[in-house]
Amino acid sequence: MKQLFDETYSENRTLWYAYFKEIEQPDLVETISRIIQTDLKTATDILNTSWIFYREELQKDALQEEVRSSIMVRLVDGQYYVHYNMSDFEFVTQREVIANRLQQLKEVLEK
């Protein structure tokens, strides 16, 4: 994945990446984990770090507005928080798959 931005404000760092193909991508958890571990090696004087990983595909919601899903990871006080912004279509069709992948990612990061 290509890094889009790396911004540090005060003691908070946020990194944005593009793009992952789909949540069921076989190497997704490993790729994100590797990126996070690499980014943490370059962190100095940072208290909190957040990562945003954008999905490549735009989807239309029920209002016909375009939605870009994203995986968000935040590291605060040694604790990882993992979240997924999803379209209504993904919620209806893939909520369980998404929840499972996020749990896998959290477990890998906490090792």
Image: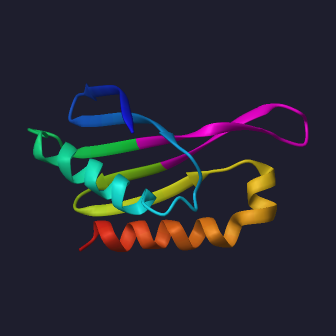
Q: Residue furthest front?
A: 26
Q: Position of residue 35 (x, y in %)?
A: 28, 48
Q: How many marks?
A: 0
Q: Position of residue 81 (x, y in %)?
A: 40, 60
Closer to us: 38 or 49:
38
Q: Position of residue 71 (x, y in %)?
A: 51, 50
Asked whether, in this view, residue 33 is left or right of residue 41, the answer is right
Closer to us: 8 or 20:
20
Q: Which quadrant, please, contains the N terminus?
A: top left
Q: Residue at x 29, y 64 (%)?
A: 79
Q: State which quadrant residue 64 falls in.
A: top right
In the image, residue 47 above or below residue 97: above
In the image, residue 11 above or below residue 41: above
Q: Which quadrant, please, contains the C terminus?
A: bottom left
Asked whether, in this view, residue 106 is left or right of residue 63, the answer is left
Q: State which quadrant residue 76 falls in.
A: bottom left
Secondary structure mostly taken by the magenta-highlighted segment of the chain? strand
Q: Residue at x 21, y 53 (%)?
A: 37
Q: Residue furthest right?
A: 63
Asked whether, in this view, residue 103 is left or right of residue 57, the answer is left
Q: Residue at x 74, y 47 (%)?
A: 87
- Does the magenta run of residues contain 75? no
Closer to us: 51 or 77:
51
Q: Position of residue 40 (x, y in %)?
A: 17, 47
- Does the magenta run of residues contain 63? yes
In the image, residue 24 above or below residue 16: below
Q: Residue at x 22, y 62 (%)?
A: 78
Region in magenta: 52-71
Asked whether, in this view, residue 72 is left or right of residue 12, the answer is right
- The image's colouring method is rainbow
